[in-house]
Image (cartoon, rainbow, N blue to C red):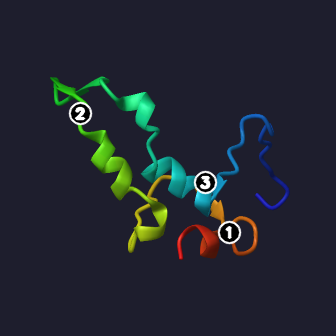
Amino acid sequence: HPTGGSFVRPKKANFGVDYVTALQSRYQVELQEVIGEEMKISSKTVMMVGFENVKQKQRLETLTEVGLRRCEVSGPGPENEIRNTTP
């Protein structure tokens, strides 16, 4: 209908995040948060160990490809932020 419309409450709307924020939330893990932590994968309990090596390998500047599917990226963010974070 040409005069019909919908209303969205601003508090309920999700406007997404910029590229670098999505990249950091997907690929960077705080080491202290996961050391010794247990998690379930397919109903099996897995103890998280050896994250010191993983931390060295998750530097954003060394990534050649990224997958940000379902990360709700809304834009590139501030000028040159992508270039400075992921050369």
- Whole-angstrom CA distance, mark 3 to mark 2, is 26 Å
The residue pinned by badge 1 equals: 81
Residue that mark 2 sits on: 49
User: What residue sits right under mark 3 in the picture?
Assistant: 21
For disc 2, the neighbor class at 10 Å (few under 14, some 14 to 19, many from 20) is: few
Q: x, y (%) of residue 73?
A: 59, 59
Mark 2 element type: loop
**The residue positioned farthest toward the left in the image shown:** 44
Position of residue 83 measured from the top left corner of the image (x, y, whole percent): 61, 76
Judging depth in this view, the residue of 70 and 36 nearest the camera is: 36
Of 34 and 16, the residue lying toward us: 34
Q: Quadrant of the N terminus?
A: bottom right
* Residue 20 drawn above or below residue 80: above
Rounded to the nearest angstrom, the CA distance separating label 3 from label 1 is: 10 Å
Q: Residue at 31% of width from left, 49% of height from top?
A: 54
Judge whether 53 appears above or below 32 on screen.
below
Q: So how many labels did they put on this image?
A: 3
Identify which residue, 12 or 47, lies in the foreground: 47
Left or right: 14 with respect to 32? right
Of the residues under marks 3 and 1, which one precedes in the sequence?
3
Q: Secondary structure at mark 1?
A: helix
Residue at screen point 72% across, 42% down? 13
Name the amino acid, label 2.
Val
* Camera-side residue of 71 and 11: 71
